[in-house]
């Protein structure tokens, strides 16, 4: 293993933005399935030999990617994905735990559009890990324009980051249907309560939902067309077919599969999650106006 070296795995929007940020203070490698014309692009084998890795591939792909590619040699890992596995309802930390000891893994959360990070605009992120030492070992890699915080609440950050994507879809629908700012603020506020209730069931801390990982990321994505998930919602409000919306998007919108995962988990454990359940129904073809009526019922 190359001591002190760092690499990003996955050269999508977020992987490239993190690579840009982490290249400010030191050399940072990047790799992906297909070769890309990016400085310090290397093959997977070289990247895997680095002591520090940031994995930025979609949540639904993590398990198979780890199975097929990952060899644990003591690397320290940051997970950049935000989603819940739809086929099993498993959280990413549970999936990673099958391959890597938890003290070697951290999860990035907080409001961070890749398009702004890649321009060097300021932002604040949380690194969530059972190991503060892991946070401390990654912290010096981050550039001056990113303020980092540490939290031990891995499950809280994971649920907040994944759930807000589903709520951003709902907010996009609300915007597209021109329901007004009152409706949108109510939706976002109730969404925040809903994700906190869901998180509490799995042992998440309330403070994670009120800080950067929850409210911070939710307010960002649920209020901006820069969010892919928000744009999925806009498309659904225009009665576009989901497959067409996703094809036009050309990038991952984690909220689509995560809505499925939350729907399954909330039914299994009897957690009250009305907004996420309606998003799932709309993704499956329900008319958003009928969902609105159902959500407004007293
Ligand atoms: N774009 C953003 O602003 C942010 C994105 N994220 C999260 O980061 C994750 C990745 O998002 P983006 O990079 O934006 O998506 P993207 O759609 O731009 O790129 C995804 C990348 O993953 C790669 N990929 C897909 N399946 C793969 C597989 N089986 N094996 C290896 N590589 C695979 C693709 O080739 C592509 O390079 C998502 O979970 C997203 O929610 C988190 C914070 C900010
Ligand atoms: O997570 C994000 C910003 O924090 C990006 O959100 P989208 O995937 O909806 O673009």
Image (cartoon, rainbow, N blue to C red):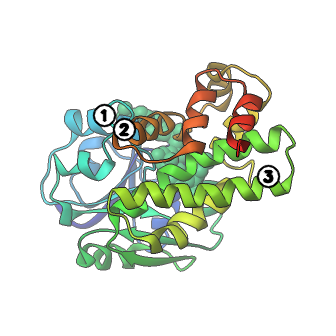
Q: Residue 131: where, in percent of width, then height?
A: 23, 73
Q: Secondary structure at mark 3?
A: helix
Point 67% across, 26% down: residue = 245
**Where is mark 2, residue-wise?**
85
Q: Which residue is mark 1?
A: 88
Check contact, mark 2 vs mark 1: CB within 8 A. Answer: yes
- Give neighbour class at mark 2: few <14, some 14-19, many 20+ (Cα, 10 Å): many
Using the numbered discs, state the Cα–Cα distance from disc 2 to disc 1 in whole angstroms. 6 Å
The relative height of residue 28 versus residue 210 in the rendered view (above or below) is above
Q: Which numbered mark, 2 or 3, is in the foreground of this view?
A: 3
Question: Residue at 48% of width from left, 61% of height from top?
Answer: 196
Kindly tell me whether mark 3's CB lies below 8 Å from ligand 2: no
The foreground one among 235 and 105 is 235
Give residue 150's position: percent from left, percent from top. 38, 77
Query: Quadrant of the rendered structure where residue 34 is?
Result: top left
On the image, the x and y values in percent for residue 278 come to: 60, 35
Mark 2 touching mark 3, by CB under 8 A? Answer: no
In this rendering, is residue 279 above or below 244?
below
In front of the other: 105 or 20: 105
For label 1, count other residues whose C-alpha is less than 10 Å away and answer few (under 14), some (14-19) or many (20+). few
| Helix, strand or loop under label 2 | loop
State whether residue 19 appears in this view: no
Residue displayed at 61% across by 20% down = 243
- Image coordinates of residue 263 in percent, x first then y, are 46, 36
Q: Which disc number belongs to residue 183?
A: 3
Q: Nearest to the eye among marks 1 and 3: give it.
A: 3
Q: Closer to the N terminus: mark 2 or mark 3?
A: 2
Q: Residues within 10 Å of mark 3 (few under 14, many from 20)?
A: some
Question: Tag 3 or tag 1, which sits nearer the N-term?
Answer: 1
Q: Is residue 236 above or below residue 265?
A: above
């Amino acid at each position: 293993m190359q001591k002190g070296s760092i690499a990003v795995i996955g050269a999508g929007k977020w992987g490239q933005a993190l690579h840009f940020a982490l290249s400010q203070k030191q050399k940072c490698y990047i790799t992906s399935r297909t070769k890309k014309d990016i400085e310090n692009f290397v093959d997977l084998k070289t990247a895997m030999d680095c002591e520090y890795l940031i994995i930025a591939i979609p949540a639904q792909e993590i398990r198979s990617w780890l199975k097929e590619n990952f060899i644990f040699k003591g690397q320290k890992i940051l997970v950049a994905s935000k989603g819940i596995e739809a086929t099993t309802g498993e959280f990413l930390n549970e999936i990673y735990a099958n391959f890597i000891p938890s003290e070697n893994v951290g999860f990035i959360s907080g409001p961070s559009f890749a398009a702004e990070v890649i321009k060097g605009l300021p932002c604040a992120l949380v690194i969530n890990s059972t190991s503060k030492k892991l946070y401390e070992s990654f912290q010096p890699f981050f550039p001056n324009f990113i303020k980092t915080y540490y939290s031990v609440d891995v499950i809280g950050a994971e649920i907040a980051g994944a759930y807000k994507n589903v709520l951003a879809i709902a907010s996009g629908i609300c915007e597209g249907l021109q329901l007004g700012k009152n409706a949108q603020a109510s939706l976002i506020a109730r969404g925040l309560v809903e994700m906190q209730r869901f998180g509490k069931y799995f042992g998440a801390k309330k403070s994670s939902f009120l800080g950067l990982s929850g409210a911070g990321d939710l307010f960002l994505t649920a209020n901006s067309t820069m969010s892919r998930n928000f744009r999925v919602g806009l498309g659904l409000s225009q009665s576009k077919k989901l497959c067409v919306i996703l094809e036009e998007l050309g990038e991952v919108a984690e909220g689509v599969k995560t809505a499925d995962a939350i729907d399954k988990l909330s039914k299994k454990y009897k957690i009250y999650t009305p907004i996420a359940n309606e998003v799932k129904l709309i993704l499956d073809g329900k008319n958003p106006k009928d969902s609105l009526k159902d959500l407004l019922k007293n």
